[in-house]
Image: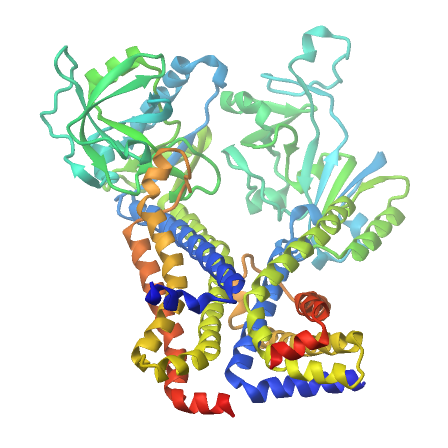
Amino acid sequence: MKIAKLAFYRVIHYFQENKLIFFLYLLGSITCVITFIYFYGNAMPNKYAEARNGLQFRQYYVTLNKTQAVDKNTFTFLKDSDIQDIKLESDSLGKIVLKTASLPDEPAAPDNPDNNDNQVDITVQAYMYGRTKIYNERGRCDFSQEELKSGKNVVVLPSLMEDTFKSGADFSIKGVRYEMIGVHTISTGFYIPYQAYIKQGYTTKKFTVTLNKALSKEGSSEFTKNLYKQFPNSSIIDPTNYFNSVSEQSPLMLLLLSIVYLISIASFLFLLKYLSDKNRSENVIYTMIGASKKNVMKIMVAENLLISLCSAVIAIFLHMALYGSFFSKINTIENITYQWNDYLVVFIFVLFLSVLTSVPFLISYSHNSIIHSKNKYD
Amino acid sequence: MKKIRMLFSFYSKNVFAVCLLFLLMTFSLFFVSNAIGQYRYVVYTKTMFQNSGLNNAVYYMPLSDSDYTSGPDIMNKKIATSTKAVAEFSAVENVLTVNIGMAGYGNRSCSYLLYNKSLNHAFPLNLSEGKWFSDDSFDKADSNKRYNVIVGGALYNHVHVNSDIPITLNNNTTLTVHVIGKLSFPTCIPDFGTGGNTISANDFLAPADMVIFQETPQLTAFLHEKSAYSPSSSMFVQFSPKASKQQKNECLDYMQKNGMYSDYNEIMKNTDVIVQNTLARQMPMPLFFLFVATISLISVSVLMVYKKMQEHSIYYLCGCSRKKSFLYMAFGIGLIALLAGALNMLFIANYQFFASRGILDLGKVIIDRYSILYIAGYIAAVILLSILLPFLVFRKESPIELYRRKDQ
């Protein structure tokens, strides 16, 4: 308590002795903390991932142990508003022979040497809500409203079937004729409207749920458990690996940010050195009247902590107040949000790093004897 | 000697802080110049495209059926077929293609480009020296004459106009060409080799070390015989203003079936996104460091004045005028910023040299005399500010008062 009081009065004294230098140091310190907060939001992998709302954090791939009829009623356990889309994928319809205009009704015999080189395992796929863009290579890949509503037999071919599309020949899947409207960029998968998928009675072997917004790691775990409950014995690939990868990168990024902060604050430490040199006599007096070197060093650390605490509080307050009007506009990506725990992490790190910045002062003090310090002051 | 000592006494006992500040300022200025250069580059490509007059055109990216192992001749034939097929539509007024090939100059690789009138009309290139091709430029090489070329890029920095230079075509044929002009910096050349769903002006206008020939049938045949050049896979298809909507749609449907296209508005929209992203992503970090360096310099200057005031009070009493005293201090403050700025300006002035030697090439940036102006302006403002605060402090305290206070 006494140490804290002494540190407090020392800081007041710094301010009273030389307002301009103290103000400049405070300004520099606040700038460095704001820089830290900015880079924390824009460079930390978890914040970046949260803002980017990347697809890899929002998709859950489910492979059923056996094919089953799946439609919108199967997913009533999910909230509509949370779902961007659900992609249904049928079981393999066999091998497709390239440059032909239809799929064979029967799977090609695996030991038939003539078919192996030109064959690809193909499935029929449909997006339940039609909210996902299919990237086109030729023609069009967007189904019209009428096609979606009526379940018209139109198909977007995989890129391996470009020649088939160009030939304009009749195309059928399992004996059902489809109009080819385009070719998409992926090498496998026939896309048809959802209503056509249901009408033709395709059974689903796999489906992919894409959420609107990425969940937290814990939320994602809950969601996966829910999926397992509804589809027991299925195999689910969730974004856990991506979350783990982000978690692994975070400490290194935090270290880099700390180094950036230390380099920035080092540019202003000479101001603090000037202020503290003026009070060298106090340290001498404390030592002469019996204070141990350890206690004097504690006072030096405490005063640095106190100034850093003030800077951090002011900086955090400024950042929160001006985030909407200024700081959000200079973010490298949109939708970066700061929660209270982010500010708390920054606050703790700034305080910890300020202790590190005291080290040169402590070393300098500890190397000098009391006589040496007194002579220096004189 | 005494004066030099006086000038540099400013830094005594503060060498570490001054060195750190100098390094911080130098690197911050460098990164800010680079970031501004990148932003200026994307804005430049956007302006080039805006002024191209291609408002009524689409960028068509036909898909090739052949893979690259078919050989350049087959690829060229396929591209020529695509071009011809599109040109045959009644709505199409002109098809803009780019014929480009690989070459070598010295031990570095470069490209050569055949520039025709349509390309020149859409994307006119600025020259820093020499002249553009005239209509009566010869088009056939003979034993005495050389092909006229215009060179561009850092690689040809040291080449003079009206000189002859050897270039090696990609089958090792050496061709001596006559330089009639040099492109001004930045050398932004149309290159229609890119494709994708989000095409922007930045994609088909790129910096390159380039030799530009005037395209003529004879030259084309000559180069075709001597070298494997190829037209870019994509093209701009310009519609006639008199074409009806139906005619246009016929052509667009064909392009949709045989590839992809992006119209002018789409390209501009994608370009605007790139411009905004460049500003948002490249600028903040360098600007933050520069701000820190600026505040730090001002702090150093104020601190130095406080530290040296007592010394200068003694100098005053020994006959040194206050004005001289202040100038010594101002020199000390200004030198840090001046040196940092001077280093950066020196780098910018010699950037073409570094890039031509392959020492440092920053890619798609514009670094020119305007960059020097920005740096000079910033340094002047910072020095002024750094000197102003100490000046106010200096004025407030008279030397004799300081001396008396110290004595007490």
x, y percent for residue B177: 21, 21
Residue lying at 75% horizontally and 83% vertically, measured from the top left:
A288
Question: Quick check: A212 left or right of B204?
Answer: right
x, y percent for residue B255: 41, 32
Task: Judge whether residue B249 can be spotted in this image.
Answer: no
Residue lying at 61% horizontally and 44% vertically, measured from the top left:
A148
Task: Judge whether residue B38 can be spotted in this image.
Answer: yes
Foreground residue among B364 and A8: A8
Please tell me in which quadrant of the rendered image residue A16 appears: bottom right
Foreground residue among B52 and B143: B143
Quarter of the picture containing the N terminus of chain B is: bottom left
x, y percent for residue B219: 22, 18
x, y percent for residue B205: 35, 39
Foreground residue among A79 and A196: A79
Question: Quick check: B79 left or right of B128?
Answer: right
Colour pattern of the rendering: rainbow
Question: Quick check: A294 left or right of A282?
Answer: right
Furthest toward the top, the residue is A113
Q: Is residue B325 above or below residue B52?
A: below
- All told, the count of numbered labels is 0
Q: Is residue B291 above or below residue B225?
A: below
Furthest toward the left, the residue is B136
Residue lying at 66% horizontally and 47% vertically, measured from the top left:
A55
Q: Is residue A76 above or below residue A295?
A: above
Q: Is residue A13 above or below residue A355?
A: below
Question: Quick check: B361 left or right of B112?
Answer: right
Please tell me in which quadrant of the rendered image residue A69 appears: top right
